């Protein structure tokens, strides 16, 4: 059952944060600038990127948007090959900002920053690691922001996460028989975290700093084991409850932007994600039918991972062709935290190149329409995981649209 436990760890963690299937893409304007938006933060999606930026907005601002992902992964080893099935997860966004006084603003953001699904063919070469994984979550984030001195704003955000996960794999029992392992969380689980952020503006220069304290989740679910041949019933584990605690890593994001010309804005972000805190994860079952890392009977299993801290570097630009029309572009290099030894097809991760393009149109300074396209390509990754050797290639197409309103 150790393979099963390793899979659970990978599912629960790899879909959650940067260099995973996390979605920093939470607004079309930011996406088109490859999310180099910490020191721009000039629309309601600032609630996600840098909440301290909302004091730039006047009156009531809100936006609605959706981001469509089209991921594709392939695996090849010698003469064997496979590709993931088509899936199209959608991440909706809603942000509301009200500037109560010249120095005080409130906001409420609702986003789906983790929308991950990958499905491989039934019985494929890696089915003992994964066949289906699906992770979905929604974040609700109230914010208060205050300009403490001229040009400098501080904001505090509470992040409430609501998440659910499901997966399926199979364990080979003979040349023609297998055990199907399915796990699903009991409804949704809640996670709690916060953001503290700063935004400073001086003439045409802007800078921002965001600290994210990762949400803590307690997943409880059912682990079900079904065999294709009843002869194996006596040796299979009992269907039972299981639980695992997960605390997401802390993040520190710094950004700077500068208006080089009245029409041209350049921006840069550096994001540091502290994955090295994930040296192990502890699973708890209701029955003593599993073994620990020393082979002794146990209701618990501790999985060693030894992930590493990673950095993402983002560059963006915006050019105003005319007061109503803006063109945008951006590039990101995102480093991967997963060691070669634990790489598997639930997330065939590696360093990423991300290119963003987009356009924005403003109607009478009351309605802002933004459209963005982003292409994510993973550098080719060869796995040294003995459970499934091979080479992975992955890419993702992303399309996003946001409509913003100002009153």
Image (cartoon, rainbow, N blue to C red):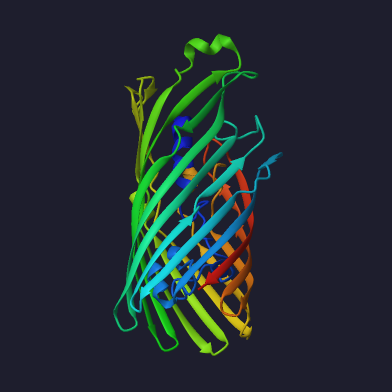
Along the horizontal axis of the image, is 278 left or right of 363?
A: left
The answer, for residue 310, to whether it is visible in the render is yes
Along the horizontal axis of the image, is 26 left or right of 160?
A: right
Where does the image place residue 355, in percent across and percent down from the top left? 61, 67
Front in this rendered view, residue 349 or 365? 365
| Residue found at the far front of this picture | 407
Where does the image place residue 303, in percent across and percent down from the top left? 38, 37
Could you tell me which quadrant the N terminus lies in? Answer: top left
For image coordinates 66% across by 31% down, the residue present is 122
Front in this rendered view, residue 4 or 396? 396
| Residue found at the far right of this picture | 79
Front in this rendered view, residue 368 or 215? 368
Q: Quadrant of residue 54?
A: bottom left
Where does the image place residue 137, in percent across and percent down from the top left? 48, 47
For image coordinates 38% across by 47% down, the residue present is 306
Where does the image place residue 203, in percent across and percent down from the top left? 41, 89
For image coordinates 54% across by 51% down, the residue present is 349
For image coordinates 67% across by 35% down, the residue present is 121
Q: Quadrant of residue 6?
A: top left
Mark count: 0
| Residue found at the far left of this picture | 148
Along the horizontal axis of the image, is 170 left or right of 205?
A: right
The answer, for residue 379, to whether it is visible in the render is no
Compared with residue 257, is residue 184 higher up or lower down, i.e. above or below?
Answer: above
């Amino acid at each position: 059952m150790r393979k099963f436990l390793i899979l659970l760890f990978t599912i629960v963690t790899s879909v959650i944060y940067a260099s995973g299937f996390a979605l920093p893409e939470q607004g079309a304007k930011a996406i088109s600038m490859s999310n180099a938006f910490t020191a721009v933060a000039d629309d309601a999606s600032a609630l996600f990127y840098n909440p301290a930026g909302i004091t730039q907005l006047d009156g009531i601002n809100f936006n609605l948007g959706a981001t469509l992902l089209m991921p594709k992964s392939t695996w090849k080893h010698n003469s064997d090959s496979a590709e993931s099935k088509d899936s199209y997860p959608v991440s909706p966004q809603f942000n509301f900002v009200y500037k109560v006084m010249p120095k005080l603003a409130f906001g409420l953001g609702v986003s789906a920053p983790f929308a991950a699904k990958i499905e491989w063919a039934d019985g494929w070469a890696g089915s003992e690691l994964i066949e289906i994984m699906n992770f979905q979550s929604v974040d609700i984030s109230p914010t208060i922001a205050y300009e403490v001195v001229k040009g400098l704003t501080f904001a505090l955000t509470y992040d409430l996460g609501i998440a659910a996960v499901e997966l399926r794999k199979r364990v080979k029992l003979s040349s023609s028989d297998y055990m199907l392992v399915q796990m699903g969380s009991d409804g949704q689980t809640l996670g709690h975290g916060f953001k503290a952020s700063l935004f400073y503006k001086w003439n045409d220069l802007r800078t921002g700093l965001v600290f994210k304290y990762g949400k803590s989740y307690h997943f409880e679910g059912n682990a079900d084991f079904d065999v294709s041949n009843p002869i194996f019933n006596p040796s299979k584990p009992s269907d039972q409850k299981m639980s695992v605690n997960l605390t997401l890593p802390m993040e520190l994001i710094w950004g700077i932007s500068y208006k080089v010309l009245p029409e041209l804005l350049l921006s840069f972000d550096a994001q540091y994600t502290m994955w090295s805190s994930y040296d192990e994860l502890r699973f708890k079952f209701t029955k003593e039918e599993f073994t620990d890392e020393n082979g002794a009977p146990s209701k618990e299993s501790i999985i060693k991972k030894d992930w590493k801290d990673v950095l993402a570097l983002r560059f963006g630009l915006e050019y105003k062709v005319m007061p109503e029309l803006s063109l945008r572009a951006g590039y990101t290099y995102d480093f991967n935290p997963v060691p070669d030894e634990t790489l598997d097809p639930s997330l065939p991760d590696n360093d990423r190149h991300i290119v963003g393009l987009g356009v924005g149109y403003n109607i009478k300074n009351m309605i802002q329409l933004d459209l963005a396209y982003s292409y994510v390509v993973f550098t080719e990754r060869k796995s040294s995981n003995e459970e499934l050797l091979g080479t992975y290639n992955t890419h993702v197409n992303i399309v996003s649209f946001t409509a913003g309103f100002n009153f």
